[in-house]
Structures are given as structure tokens and as C-alpha cells.
Amino acid sequence: MIETAKKIVIFGDFGVCIMKSIVLIIITLSTFSAIAQEENEAILKAKRASNNFVYEGNENIKNDDYITAEMDYRKAISEEQTNISGIYNLGTSYYKKGNFEESLYRLQQAANKATDRAEKHKAFHNIGNILMQNKQCKEAVEAYKNALRNDPSDEETRYNFGLAKECAKQQEEENKNNQDDQDDNKDQNQDNKDQDQENQDENKDQENQDQDQEGDNKDEPKDEGDQDKDQGDEKENEDGKPKDDKQDQGEGDQDKKEQPQQPKPQQGQMSPQQIKNLLEAMNNQEQKVQEKMNAEKQKGERIQTDKDW
């Protein structure tokens, strides 16, 4: 009986512990439930506030008040960062203001966070439009492809896709031509550089040759006396007589130079003409003497004649 009573007591203490644990669990669950409920209410409240800001922003867009609309969309994103409508509309407002860089950033955010295919389609479509404005045709082709993947039936997106493809093709051809021109210019510049280097090498070789020639001249100097002698020899002709400096004055004077000139007699000497006249007089005188002697000889001789029969 005593052992049975002890068991009952022990079982009674264990039951109390179990009851306390159950009560604690219930209280904890109730607390978590209340917290979760409060969090859900806060989320719902933020969502409603965010949607209200989006609505106000849309109204301001209708009135062309882009500055106020931008502020409303920023408030909407601040209340709920996953509000795709607020992000997308903010990007659209930037696009209408001409701020393509900020608009592209916001629309890419919307495309990445969107879970609805329609929202993705609109985001990628406008991304393609911005890229076309920036002349980024190749990137625009990819954006329109993504838009068509989410809504293949949109004819406007398909039309823009065709324009982007044509634009990308033209840009590719222009880039190729520009690359060819750059390659040609590069080759030409290289040729010019090689030619300049070759000219520099030739000039350097010529300078080295000139320096070597100067060194040879220094090693074998020419005697100044010999130089003077050579210069003197140049001034004399083959007969040892001085050359006439006026020898090359012209062909008109050549005949005069070839005719012998009568040398002028020096004082105390007879001129050649006088000597010639004297010789002729002596010859004449000698001839007269010879004739006289012949005449006298003939007088003393017997003259034979032919007999007249």
C-alpha cells in the first residue's frame, strides 16, 4: 500500500509539470500569433499606403506634374520596396522627363523584381525604347526579345524589335568599316615609322662615313708646299710657260690667239723685220757682184759661133 501511494504522488508531480509545459506552449503560441498578426497588419498598412502614393503619383502624371509624381513614387517605394507599380511608374516618369539613365535603372529594377509576365513585358519594352534613344541598338534587340517572350502578341514590341535589328546591322557595318580604316591607318603609320627609321639609319651611316673620312684626312695631312707647288703647276702650261688667264674668254678670240704675234724688239736689238730687210739687201748686193764677175769673165773668153757656109 505504501509503494502504491508513492507512485501516485510521483505521478501527480509529473502531471503538474506536463500541465505547466502545455500552458507555457499555449501562451507562446498565442504570443507568436499576436506578433504575426501585428506584422501582417503593418505589412498591409504599408501596402495600402504605398498603393495610395502610386495612385497620387499617377494623378500627378496626368496633370504633367512630373516632379510631384516622382516624389509620390519614391514614397510608395519607401513604404513597400517590392511595389513593382511604384518602381515602374517612377522609371516611366524619368523617361518622360528625358532622364534616360535613371529611367533605365528603375525599369531594370522593375523587370528583375516583377513576378507577373505583363509587368515584365512592359518593363522590358520600355527598356528597349530607352536603349534605342541612346543608340544602343544591339542591347535594345535583346530587351525587345525579353518583352516578346513575356507577351508575344504585342505588335508594337514586334515592330520596335524589327527597327532595333536593322539599326544594329547598320551599326555593325559602320564599326567594321571604321575598324578597317583604323587598320589601314595603323598600317600606314607603321610604314611611315619604318621609313623614318630607315632614313635615320641611312643618315647615321652617312654621318659615320663622314666622320671616318675626316679621320683619314687628319691622319694623312698634305704638305702645304706641295699644295702651293700643285697650284703653281696648274698655272703653268706644258712648256713651263705661265698659262694665259684669259685663255677661256670665248671662241671669238681663239683666232687671234692662234696667229703669231710679232715680238716687240727690246732696246738695242733689231726687229725680225729689220733683220729680214737687211738679209734681202745683202742678197741683192751679192747677186749684183756675181753678175758683174760673170760679165767680166765673158769678155776674156772666145765666143764660138756657127759657121756660115
Image: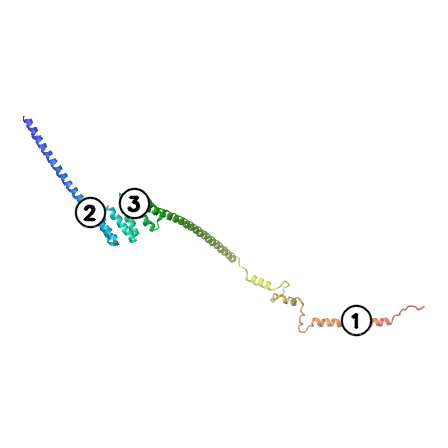
Looking at the figure, which quarter contains the C terminus? bottom right
Extreme residue toward the left, this view = 1
Extreme residue toward the bottom, this view = 267
Query: Cα distance, mark 3 to mark 1?
Result: 152 Å
The amino acid marked with disc number 2 is Arg
* Tag of residue 195: none
Tell me if 95 is positioned left or right of 37 in this view: right
Taking the spot 16% from the left edge, 42% from the top edge, the residue there is 37
Of callouts 3 and 1, the N-terminal one: 3
Query: For the residues carrying marks 2 and 1, which lies nearer the camera in this image?
Result: 2
Give the SS element for disc 3: helix
* Tag of residue 287: 1
Give the SS element for disc 2: helix
Q: Residue 69, image x and y in percent?
A: 24, 52
The residue carrying mark 2 is 48
The amino acid marked with disc number 1 is Gln
Tell me if 181 is positioned left or right of 308 in this view: left
Quarter location, residue 119: top left
Taking the spot 71% from the left edge, 71% from the top edge, the residue there is 273
Mark 1: give few (<14), some (14-19) or many (20+) Cα within 10 Å.
Answer: few
Query: For the residues carrying marks 3 and 1, which lies nearer the camera in this image?
Result: 3
Q: Which colour assignment does the render follow?
A: rainbow
Give the SS element for disc 1: helix
The amino acid marked with disc number 3 is His
Mark 2: give few (<14), some (14-19) or many (20+) Cα within 10 Å.
Answer: some
Of callouts 2 and 3, the N-terminal one: 2
Q: How many marks?
A: 3
* Tag of residue 121: 3
